[in-house]
Amino acid sequence: MILAAGGEGLRLLLFWLVAGGLAGWLASLVARTGNRMGCLLNIAVGILGAVIGGWIFHSLNLTTPVGHPFIGTVFVSFVGATVLLLFLRLLTGMRR
């Protein structure tokens, strides 16, 4: 179970929620979709952005910035979330 093992699962879940929320919020500012997205959508976009950013970084043989793992995670998630939002904006024709 994810919340077993002495609370490590809970810490991991909170880590991804905070990192995803921050990355999604920053990406929504860059893509100018911030006033259309709420907290839950920012988290979802940030977590999906982590998957997309991880794939992009792995495909291009890039490494995350050196430093605290949280900063690297948020950076990769931010890149992926920004790509996701700009791609969705292109597909749906969202206006500024």
Image (spheres, rainbow, N blue to C red):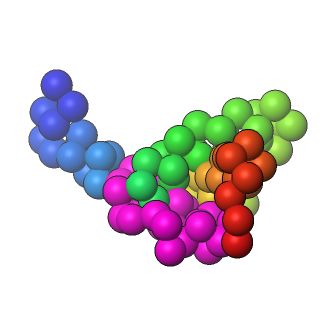
Please tell me which residue lies in front, 10 or 90. Answer: 90
By secondary structure, the bulk of the magenta-drawn segment is best described as helix
Residue located 86% across and 37% down the image: 60
Please tell me which residue lies in front, 48 or 16. Answer: 48
State whether residue 66 appears in this view: no
* Residue at the extreme top of the image, as rendered: 1
* Residue at the extreme right of the image, as rendered: 60
Segment colored magenta: 15-40
Q: Quadrant of residue 23?
A: bottom right
- In percent of width and height, residue 74 lies at 56, 60
- In percent of width and height, residue 65 lies at 72, 60
Total marks drawn?
Answer: 0
User: In the rendered view, does 38 fall on the left or right side of 59?
Assistant: left
State whether residue 14 appears in this view: yes
Q: Quadrant of the C terminus?
A: bottom right
- The stretch drawn in magenta includes residue 18: yes
User: In the rendered view, does 90 fall on the left or right side of 15?
Assistant: right
